[in-house]
C-alpha cells in the first residue's frame, strides 16, 4: 500500500496542473494576482463584519479587503511602520498579508510570506512584479489594498507614515474600487522619505 501512495500523489498533482492549464484556454482568462494566502473556499462573510464608513456615506465591510505590506527585517522604516500597521489592523479588523523582501519576518509580522518565482528564468518574483510592475519603485515598507473578491490591487502608501494617513488612503482606494476606477488612473502614490529602496 505504501508503494502506491507516491503514484497517487503524482496523479493528483498532474490532475491539478492539467486543470490549471485547461482554465487558461478559456476565452476571458487573464493572469490574476498570485495566491495571497487567502483560505480557499472561505468567503469573507464568514467572519464577523468589520464595517467602515466612507466619506460619501457608503459603508463597506473590511472583510472584503486586505492590506498587503512589503517589508524587510533589515529595514529601519519597516521596523517603525509594521508595529503601527499591525495594531491598526487589529483595531479595524482588516487582514494584513506581509511579504518579506529579505526572507525574514520582523517583530510585528514574525511569519511573513516570501515572494516566489514560478521558474528560475524569471528575473523577479511574481508577487513583486504584480504589485510593483506599474513602475512603482520597489521599496519597503510599501502597502497595497486588495479587494479579496476580485484581486484588484491599489497602492496605498510607500514609506513610514501614521495610521490616520493609511486609513484615509484606504478609504479613498475602497471608493475607487467600488466605483471601478483603475489603479493607474488615480495619480501618484503618496510616499515619504522614510523608506528603503531596493
Image (spheres, rainbow, N blue to C red):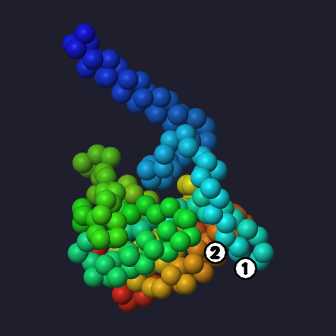
The reply to whether dot 2 and dot 1 touch (C-beta < 8 Å) is: yes
Give percent across and percent down for residue 150: 60, 53
- The answer to whether residue 26 is left or right of residue 101 is right
> What element does badge 2 sit on?
helix
- The answer to whether residue 118 is left or right of residue 132 is left
**Looking at the rendered structure, which numbered label has been put on residue 151?**
none
Q: Quadrant of the C terminus?
A: bottom left
Please state which of residues 2 and 47 is positioned toward the viewer in this rendering: 47
Residue annotated with mark 2 = 171
- The answer to whether residue 80 is left or right of residue 6 is right
Give percent across and percent down for residue 83: 38, 76
Going 36% across and 27% down the picture, which residue do you hit? Answer: 13
The part of the image, by quadrant, that contains residue 173 is bottom right
- The answer to whether residue 129 is left or right of residue 50 is left
71 w.r.t. 9: above or below? below
> What element does badge 1 sit on?
loop
Sequence-first tag of 2 and 1: 1
Going 57% across and 55% down the picture, which residue do you hit? Answer: 148
Residue annotated with mark 1 = 55
The part of the image, by quadrant, that contains residue 81 is bottom left
Amino acid at each position: 500500500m505504501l508503494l502506491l501512495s507516491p503514484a497517487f500523489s503524482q496523479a493528483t498533482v498532474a490532475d491539478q496542473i492539467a486543470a490549471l492549464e485547461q482554465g487558461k484556454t478559456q476565452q476571458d482568462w487573464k493572469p490574476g494576482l498570485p495566491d495571497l494566502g487567502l483560505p480557499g473556499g472561505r468567503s469573507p462573510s464568514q467572519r464577523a463584519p468589520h464595517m467602515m464608513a466612507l466619506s460619501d456615506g457608503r459603508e463597506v465591510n473590511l472583510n472584503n479587503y486586505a492590506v498587503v505590506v512589503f517589508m524587510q527585517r533589515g529595514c529601519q522604516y519597516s521596523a517603525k511602520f509594521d508595529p503601527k500597521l499591525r495594531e491598526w489592523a487589529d483595531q479595524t479588523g482588516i487582514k494584513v498579508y506581509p511579504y518579506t523582501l529579505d526572507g525574514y519576518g520582523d517583530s510585528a509580522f514574525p511569519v511573513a510570506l516570501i515572494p516566489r518565482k514560478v521558474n528560475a528564468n524569471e528575473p523577479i518574483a511574481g508577487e513583486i512584479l504584480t504589485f510593483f510592475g506599474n513602475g512603482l519603485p520597489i521599496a519597503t515598507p510599501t502597502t497595497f489594498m486588495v479587494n479579496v473578491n476580485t484581486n484588484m490591487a491599489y497602492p496605498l502608501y510607500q514609506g513610514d507614515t501614521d495610521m490616520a494617513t493609511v486609513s484615509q488612503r484606504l478609504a479613498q482606494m475602497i471608493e475607487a474600487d467600488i466605483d471601478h476606477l483603475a489603479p493607474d488612473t488615480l495619480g501618484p502614490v503618496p510616499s515619504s522619505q522614510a523608506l528603503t529602496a531596493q
